[in-house]
Image (spheres, coloured by chain):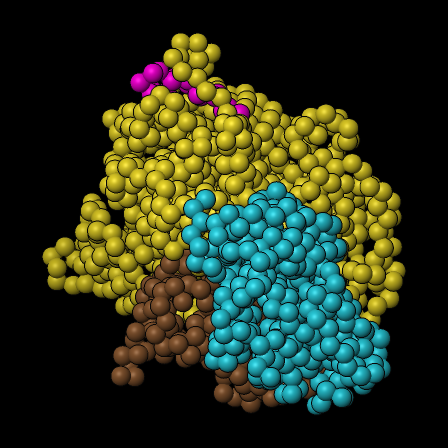
Chain colours: A cyan, B brown, C yellow
Amino acid sequence: MWSASGRRLRASSANPRADQVKPPPFDYAKPASLSEALELLASDDDAKILAGGQSFVPVLNFRLASPSLLIDINGLAELGRISLVDGGLRLGAIVRYRDLEDSELVAAENPLLAHALHHIAHYQIRNRGTVGGSSSHADPSAEFPAVSALCGAEYVLQSIRGSRVLPADEFFLGALTTALEADEILTEIRFPPWPRDRRWAFEEIAPRLGDFAILGAAVLLDPGETRILVFGAGDRASRLPRAEAALRGRTLDKAAILEAAKLASEEIEPQGDIHATAEYRKAMAEVLVERCLERASGVKVVA
Amino acid sequence: MTPRTVKLRVNGEAREGQAEPRLLLADFLRHELHLTGTHVGCEHGVCGACTVIVDGRAMRSCLMFAVQAEGTEITTVEGLGTPENLSPLQDAFHRHHALQCGFCTAGILTTMTALLKEEPDPTPDRVREVLSGNLCRCTGYIPIVDAVLDAAEKIRAAKA
Amino acid sequence: MQPKPEGLDPKTFIGQPILRNEDARFLTGGGTYSDDVTRPGMLHAAILRSSHAHGLVRGIDASEALALPGVVAVYAWADIADIAQPIPIRLAPLVGLDRFPQYCLASDKVRFVGEPIALVVAESRYIAEDALNLISVDIEELPAIVDFAGASAPKSLLHDAHGTNIASAYEVQRGDVKAAFAEADYRRRETFVCQRHTGVPMETRAVIAEWDVAAQHMTVWGATKVPFPNRATLAKMLGLEDKSVDLIEVDVGGGFGIRGEFYPEDFLIPFAAKKLGRPVKWIEDRREHLLSAQHSRDVSCILEIACKSDGTILGLYAELFVDLGAYVRTVGGVVPAKAAQFVPGPYRIANVGCSVQIFLSNKTPVGTYRAPGRYESNFFRERLIDMAAHDLGIDPAEIRRRNLVLGSEMPYGIGKLVPYEPEGEYDTGDFVAAFERALQDSDWNALNARQGEDEDGWLHGTGLACFVETGGAGPKETARLVVRKEDGGINLFIGSSALGQGHETVFAQICADALGIPFKGIRVFHGSTTYLDEGYGTYASRAIVMGGSAVLNTAETLIETMKPLAAEALGFPNEALVWKAGRFETESGGSSIGLAELAAATAQEIRADGSFSSTRRTASYGTHVAHVAVDRRTGKIRLIDYYVVEDVGRIINPLIVHGQAVGGVVQGLGGAFLENLAYDENGQFLAGSFADYLMPTATDFPSIHCTSLELSRAPSNPLGAKGAGEGGTTAAGAAIGNAVSAALRKYGAEVHELPVTPSKVWSLIAQAKAAAGQ
C-alpha cells in the first residue's frame, strides 16, 4: 500500500520500483466549468482529477498511477467556496487548507476542524492542498477525513449521470479507497451545524509535527450524546460504537471516562509499522481517548 | 505528449517556455527557464528545497506541473536579491551563518519571504512551525530561526 | 562567540567569526550544484535497480526499452563484462574484506534492493525512466539474509564462492582483560543495538561525464570528498592514465561521510559517455539515494564492564556484530574497526578486549557517516557506565570524573585496537576540564537533582556522555598559491574538497595570516583534479588540519620563492629582504615592494606548491549533556535542553565551528530519536521516502547549546588544529540513551536500542511494569 500527502508519503510492505521520480506521460486539460470537467472525465476511463496535487503528484512522480489524462479542476471557482448553508459549513472540493486557516467562518463554525488544521502537513502543503484532494486520497491517518467523519459530514459526488450525497462513513471505504466512481468528482463537503453548546477535543501522536498520526483521537460532547473517533488505527478513521455506548445516558465522570477509554483500546485492531507497534497504537487509543474526554468534559482524571 | 507553451511571470519578468504536461514546475524553472537557484531534493514534496512563491503563496514546485503555472506570477530565489544587494532576509542568513552547503537555502528563503509578508512579526514558535516544512541537514535550524526573527525585526524597523 | 585564541604570532583573521565568502552566491541562487551543470548535446541516465533483496539474474531483455523513441542505449552486465573491475577498497582493509567487492552492475546475482542492474541513457530523464518500465528482468528469488543469526547459519550465501557470509572476524586487546574481570568487585554485561542510519545530504549524488574524443580526455563533474583517489580508480577502470581524467568539484550540497565515495555510477556514467561520444548526466533521485548511497551504523554489541566498588573501571569486553550489507565498499572496515577502537572512549581503562564479527546481509552496503563507529560505541559504553554507576551507588558525573584520562597522562597510549593501524594515542587534552565545563554550562547539579521528577506526568531525566574523536590525519594534502598578475591577490588551490562547510572562507583566513595580507584578495579553489597534480580530499575532519597546514607550509615556500624576485625587482640583488605585512622590505627599511608590484615586475607566474603530511591523529574530545522529559503514558520525549562542550584545539572561524557543532548535534539527535533505515524479514526496504526516513525538522530540537574550546593544541600540525566536524554528532545517541533511562529510573527500564521512539519507550515502561508485577 502506498499513500501520500506532500511530505507525508509512506510505504508499507513491498516497494514497487525504487528508481523513478518523474511522472509518466499523460495529457492535460483545464476545464472552465464543472460540466466540462464531468464530460471530460466521463469520456476517458483512465482520466484522473487533479486538485491541489499534494497527495496525488507524489503518487504520479513515483509512477504508482498512470492516468491518460489529468483534469485540472483548480480553475473551477465554484468549487472553491467556504459557505454556511442552513447553519452548516460547506466546503467546495478545492478549498485549500490555507483557506480554512484564514477563514473566520471555519473558526466560528467548526473549532475542531480549525484546531486539527495545525496538524495537517506543513505551511507550503497547506497553501495548495485541498480538502477534496485529501478526502479523495483517503489516507487512514489523515486528519481532515477523520474530523469530517466524526462530525457526520456529507460528501457530494457529481457525474454526468447526476449527483449523490454520501455520509462520510459511506464515502470512505478503506485505505486509499472511496466510493467515488471513475466518472465522479467530489465537489463539496457539507458539515452539519455545529451546536453552540458542543464541547470537543482532539489529540494525536505523530513522530514529528506535520507527520501523519501514529494514532489520533477526537471526541464531541453534545447533550445526550458523546462521539468518539480514532484514526491511524485501521483502514479509515472510525467512530467507536462500544466506547460511545458505554457513555450513553451516563454522567461523564472519571469512572465513565476510564471505562470508555479502555473500550476504545479494545475496540480497534491496528497494525504495526516501522514507526510504532500495533500494541502501542492500541494503548494510545486508551490514553488519547481518555485525554480527549477529560479535556472536553473538564472532569479531572488522575491516572 | 506534445509540449505546449507556458507563459507566466517569473521574478517580475514575462517568460515563456515549452513543457509537456508531465513536466514538473521545478524542472521547468531549472532546465527550461535556466533558473537553477531552485533546487530539487526529493520530488515527493517533503524536503521543501524546491519551494517557490506562486501568486504570493509558498508552494512546492515538485508538486505542480509547469502547465499549471500558466498565467501565474512566480518568485524564485533569484528574485529575492542580488549578491550586491541582498534582501534583509538573505543578509540575516549571511550574518547568522544560517546556511552551510546552501542546497536547502533557496526553499527556505522563499518560504520565509512569503511568511514575513503575511506575518511581519511571527513568534519564534511560529517560525519553527513554518520552517518544519523544509529539511536542512547542515545547520540544525537554530541559526535559521534566529536569522528569520532578526530579518523580521529589521524589515519592521525599516517600515516604521 | 569564542574568545580570540592566543597564537604564537598576533593573527588578524584566524580565530575571527568572519562571514563566509560562499554565502552571497548560495543566497541568491548563484551556486553551481551538480544538476546545474549542462553540457552541449547532453543525454540523461536512469538506473534500473533490483527490487529483490537476493536473487539469481536469469535474463535481461531491453529490446522494448531500446525501441522507445528517445532512448539511446541500455547497458547491462554483458556490456561491461569484458572491462569490469571491482570497486576498490580505499580504507580499512581488514583481512577478508577484499573478497566481497561490488561490481558496477549486477552480473549473475542481485544482493540488495537497489543494486544497479542496467543503465538507460535517453534524451531526457523522463524518457529514461519511461524505459525502465520496459526492461524485463527475470530474477529467481533466493532467501534473504537480514541479521547475524541468518548470516552465521548460512541457509543462503551472498557470495557462493567464499562459502561464508562472515566478511571478517578478529580479536583485539590491550592489557589483560581476563585478569581484570577476575579481580573486579563488580561486573555487568548488556546487549545494545545502534540502528542503521546514514548521512542523507540534501543534494543527492550526481555524475556528469563528457568524453573528448580528440583529446582522449574524460571530464567528470559532481566529484567531492576524495576526488584524487576517485580519479585514479576511474582512470584504471576506463584503461586511461590519471592525467587523461579530470574530476571537477562544483558546489556540493552536503556530504557527511557518505557522498563522494566511488560508487557504481561513478564508472557507469563516464563509461556511457565514452561509449556514446556524448555527455551524459545522472542525478540520483531521493529514493535511489536512500537505497543505494552508503548506509551506516548498524552495529550491535554485547558489552561487559568490570569495576572496583569505587567505580574505577578495570576492564571492558565487547563483542561487536557489524552488518556491512551486501558488499564491501570503498571505506572497507572503518565502521567496525572504529567501533572497536572507541569502545573505551576517553577513559583510563587498562584492559580492553573486542571481538569483532563483520557479516554480510542482503542490504545496502555500509560505509562511513559522521563519527563512524564512534557514535555506536559511545552509545554502548556510556549506557553501561550509567548502569554501573547506578548499581554501585555512584553519581553518574562522579564515575566519569574518576575514570577520565588526565591531562598529565597525555599523550595517552590506546594500544593497538585496530588491526591495520599501528598503536594509537590521544595526543593532547584535558578531558576533565571539558567535562567540568559541560557540567557548569548545563548547571548539572540542578538538573541532576531533578532526575526522575514527575511534572504533570512528564518524567525528567538528564544524561551525560563523554567522547573522544581522533581524526585529522591520513594521506598528504597539497596546496598551491599563485600570485594573480592583475591585482597581486592570491589564488589558493587546495586538494581538500568542500562539502558545504565554508572552506573558501577558512582557507583564505589561514592564508591571509600566513602571508600577512588582506583576506579579501584571496580566492580559494578546491577539490577539482584540474587545480593540482595531486591531492587527496576531505574526510575524518581532516580539511583544516591537513589542508590548512598545507596552506601554511605553502605560504612559507611562496615567500622564499618570491624573495630573490623581490630583491631583483627592488634593485638590491644582494640585500637581505624581510617579509612584513604582505611586503618585502630591505633590512634598512628604505625600499619595499608588495605582491601587486612584484607580480607586475615579474615575467613568469609567481607560484609555490606545498603539502602537509601527518599520520599522527588529533584527539578532539568533550562531553554532551541532555535534559529530556518523557510522557510516562505515551512515551513521547521532549528534548528540553542539550549541551555540548568540545575542545577542538584551534578555532580558525568560531562561527563555522559553532555551526558544525550545532548541526552535528541535530544529526546525532536524528539518529537518537528518529532515523531508521528499516528492512523487513525478506530484505525489503521500508524507508524509501522522506515520510519513512524521518530526519529532524525545525520544531524537534530547538534548544541546543554548544561551546567550543581551545584547551589543547594538536602537536601534529603547525596550526595546532584538531578535527571539529564530528564532536556534535558522536555522543548524541549516548546522552539521549542515558537521559531517557534516567527519566525511566523509577520503572527500572533501561534503553538498549536506538532510536528511542515513543513506541519503544512505552514498551520499555510496559515491560518493566509487567516484570515488577504492577
Q: A143 or C612: nearer the eye?
A: A143
Say above or below: C42 vs C99. below
Q: A148 or B135: nearer the eye?
A: A148
Say above or below: C706 vs C302. below
Magenta region, residue range: C302-318
Does residue C148 belong to the magenta stretch?
no
Say above or below: B71 vs C586. below
Q: Which residue is at 31% across, 28% downward? A: C395
Where residue A81 sits: x, y (%)?
59, 84
Where residue A77 sits: x, y (%)?
63, 88
Q: Which residue is at 76% across, 43% downward? A: C110
Where residue B78 sits: x, y (%)?
48, 77
Quadrant of the rendering where the N terminus of chain C is positioned: bottom left
Q: What is the number of callouts on the image?
A: 0
Q: Is residue C29 left or right of residue C428?
A: right
Q: Which residue is at 48% across, 52% downward? A: A253
Does residue C308 belong to the magenta stretch?
yes
| Residue C387 placement: quadrant | top left
